Image: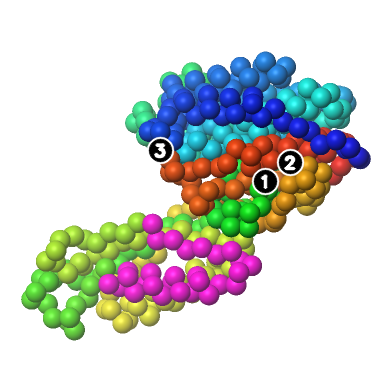
Amino acid sequence: MSQNKPIQTNRARMKKEFTAQSQIGRAGKTGLARIALTPEYNRVRKLVRGWMEAAGLGTRVDAVGNLFGRKEGRVKGLPAVMAGSHLDSQNPGGRFDGPAGVLTALEAVRRIAEVGAAHDHPLEVVAFVGEESACGIVTFGSSVLAGQLGAAGMKAAIHPPTGKSVYEAVRLAGGNPARVAGCRLPRKSLKAFVELHIEQGPVLEAAKVPIGIVDTIVGALRGDIHFEGQTAHSGGQPMSYRRDAAMAAADFMVEAEAMARRAPEGQRMTLTFGMMSARPGWYSIVPGGASISFDLRSKSAKASEAMLERMKKALGRIRKKRGVKSRLQRKVKYVPCPASRGIRQALDRAAGETGHASLTLSSGGIHDACRIAALCPVGMVFVPSVKGLSHTPEEFTRFPDIVAGAEVLASAILRLADRRVKA
Ligand SMILES: [Zn+2]
């Protein structure tokens, strides 16, 4: 297949749309607090749906709130090539995490329509409802589409803005949670899914490259570790007598972090202790209890499991040294999700055709694409995050980089919508 002319975007229109969406659920000057299943969320979805319809796409919102805009292909009955991301934010988050993927997908499909480029497969733009944990369930909408979340899971999770269950919040937002099972997309309905997202890390900016082609979305193991020692008087208890649970936790964190730093670069391992607490928690009390959370990520599930075993051994040594007990509780496991070869190739060629420099990198964040991978081959394209920041109102991506992303996305999905091209 040859595409002589890469598809140009309408920059003025894109800029207008980006600004308009960032005003809904605004938090401060540059932030967004737009949690899924709230009135603000419904407003932005309506706005984007209007743009889809103006572009001639056939739209629908499913029973939980996922939005789709579809342009039919020239061959009947073929599965769709889908692109998009989410419109909800953290509380507060930035203006780019999610909307960048939805609006570039919209622009890509709209420009394909406007220039009259032929494609065999249908093209579909998606805005998943509720990707951020701020809505109560991380990757909520895409998990429903993949058939990985049902009514029970929705009833068990709390939607923080309303204080009700996610199930009830769907109803309050105008959806029909009883029909969640019917939202599941049949496997044969999708050929490929491509998600554009901001990198949320520093690699592209440091390399001065606008396009990142993702090879793997890392997996994650998450849980808590509890330490139990002896509570005592901070002045009365000499250092040599103590069974200080917080110091045992500190020892462990330093040792485990050093092990994670020694992991080979290719594993892209990260280890984070995001929460710590000491009990009972006072200036003059040696803490008898301490708890820490852990979040261990890697491209390799095997490397993560091996690291967890080393962490358990370290806990054993620290128990002996400090005279404490410890208990490690696993809570969440996400397996790593590789991008398909076909989609990576399509993105690579698209970057070449559109003249944008690209490099290959891994995604340290979990994305909707990981859920949709249960249905079809998936791929991701990243655009740079200034200073690598995200999940904060300081999050920023330069507009020319978003434009570059839209051009690469348009060219890639057009290629993938050719029935001779393998995803
Ligand atoms: Zn996101």
CA distance separating discs 1 and 3: 24 Å
Instruction: Give the residue type that dot 3 points to.
Output: Pro
Say which residue label 1 marks.
381
Residue 106 colored in magenta in the image? no
Image height check: is 379 above or below 331?
above
Image height check: is 259 above or below 89?
below
Mark 2 or mark 3: name the one nearer the start of the chain.
Answer: 3
Say which residue label 2 marks.
408
Q: Residue 396 location in percent, x, y?
A: 51, 42
Q: Are marks 2 and 3 in contact (CB under 8 Å)?
A: no
Q: Residue 14 location in percent, x, y?
A: 63, 28
Give the position of the N terminus as an image quadrant.
top right
Is 314 on the left or on the right of 423, as rendered?
A: left
Camera-nearest label, 2 or 3: 2
Region of the chain picked out in magenta, as a range: 247-274
Dot 2 falls on a residue whose secondary structure is: helix
CA distance separating discs 1 and 2: 9 Å
Q: Could you say which quadrant of the image residue 324 lies in?
A: bottom left
Instruction: Give the residue type that dot 2 points to.
Output: Val
Query: Closest to the observer: 71 or 180?
Result: 71
Query: Closest to the observer: 244 or 284?
Result: 284
Q: Residue 211 location in percent, x, y?
A: 68, 48
Q: Could you say which quadrant of the image residue 331 lies in?
A: bottom left
Mark 1 Cα-neighbour bin, 10 Å: few <14, some 14–19, many ≥20: many
Is 207 on the left or on the right of 342, as rendered?
A: left
The kind of secondary structure the magenta stretch mainly shows is helix
Camera-nearest label, 1 or 2: 2
Which dot marks residue 92? 3
CA distance separating discs 2 and 3: 29 Å
Dot 1 falls on a residue whose secondary structure is: strand
- Residue at image position (77%, 45%) is 355
